[in-house]
Amino acid sequence: MRRDPLAFLGEDMSALKTQGLYRRLRVLDDTQAARTRIDGREVVNLSSNNYLGLTTHPRLKEKARAALEQLGVGTGSVRTIAGTMAIHMELERRLAAFKKTEAAVVFQSGFAANAGTVAAILTKDDFVISDELNHASIIDGSRLSRASIKVFPHRDASAARAILKDLPKTPRKLLITDGVFSMDGDLGALPELCELAEEFGCIMMVDDAHASGVFGANGRGTIDHFGLHGRVDVQVGTLSKAVGALGGYVAGSRSLIEFLHHRGRPFLFSTSHPPSVAATCLAAIDVLLEEPQLIEQLWANTRFFKAGLKSLGLNTGASESPITPVIVGDASVAMRLSDRLFEEGVFAQGIGFPTVARDKARVRTIVMATHTREDLQFALDTFGKVGRELGLI
Ligand SMILES: Cc1ncc(COP(=O)(O)O)c(C=O)c1O
């Protein structure tokens, strides 16, 4: 009988189970909302990137429905052959104006935008200087580019400077950071890194996936928040989190965007967004511009919830955003905490290695604009109850 050549995969999964790191997929029985049903249980949802509640916003749903009726369900082609519709071009114009850049290009996801862009603009003779906690899509894009990868300790601009001082004066060096770090909720060292990029002639790139719709005027992101317009060459954002739909984009100079039309491999070799997705994103930009109270509510909820977690005596790290980790160290404790919270009606996913360092396992919470005070107080009371039960407080 033929031996299963993939048997080693099962062994890997057994090892995860022994280490308490195996995760069954949680299944939503309802919408992606602040209070919803997951695996048959009513929960307060603290694991969603749907910061502003836009996944179910009436204006977005209406525009998606209209585009579906008028333009159909799919595009049937990649952008560079027959898959560019007028609505894609309109979305890119609106995104560029929103980000205050000359141009923008939309990819199928934020992952594709990061990986496709880094891989396209660098060659094996170039260097990437990257924060150690940058997103996996940046790491993968860097590897694909075959450039030399130099990693600096988290947010440590002086360490980045020491690396840059030792590098040859090659024309292409990419200095890259997340705007908001997805597992810790802290901000990249953008002002310091922009200084360095100017001093050493680097391309400056920021992945603002978790900042778009959250930081800066009307949710323009960390570049706006820090007043760095014109100093970041490559801005990546996602349409999959606060914007509530799906996709990623790069905003920058016209020549950067035209280059990506010709060299960004996910743009060239993967089918474009259905028109309903583009229409949804256009409606989301309208909401960001016309309903800023959603962002204000997100921040009011964030302040309330963070203060509550801290006053319980939990370790919430150095977060500056609606993402607040509850760091417990050991992965099996994080998974136990997450499971017990879930049984009590609070969904906050446990996160362990390799997503975070082995000794920094955590439960990650994300507040939404659409949580009510009752939802958040219930979640805090539950953290208190379960935290005491597990000896964390
Ligand atoms: C920092 C960061 N960058 C990029 C991405 C990828 O975005 P998307 O989900 O749109 O592919 C994510 C999402 O997990 C992220 O957290």
Image (cartoon, rainbow, N blue to C red):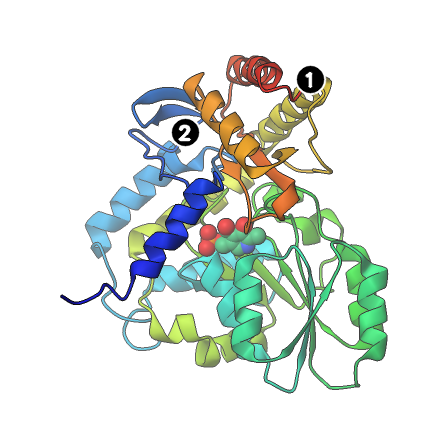
Residue in front for this viewpoint, 215 or 66: 215
Residue pictured at 57% horizontal, 78% vertical: 121
Q: Amino acid at mark 1?
A: Leu
First in residue order: circle 1 vs circle 2: 2
Q: Is any atom of residue 278 visible in this view?
A: no
- Percent position of residue 41, x then y: 34, 21
Image quadrant in which the C terminus is located: top right
Q: Is any atom of residue 58 visible in this view?
A: yes
Q: Secondary structure at mark 1?
A: loop
Residue pictured at 35% horizontal, 39% vertical: 25
Left or right for 70, reference 114: left
Q: Which residue is mark 1?
A: 312
Residue in front for this viewpoint, 129 or 233: 129
- Percent position of residue 331, x then y: 56, 38
Residue pictured at 41% horizontal, 70% vertical: 266
Q: In which quarter of the view is residue 23 placed?
A: top left
Q: In which quarter of the view is residue 159 placed?
A: bottom right
Identify whether 287 is placed above or below 228.
above
Q: Which residue is mark 2?
A: 33
Identify whether 86 is placed above or below 187.
below
Residue furthest out toward the left: 1
- Percent position of residue 248, x then y: 47, 58
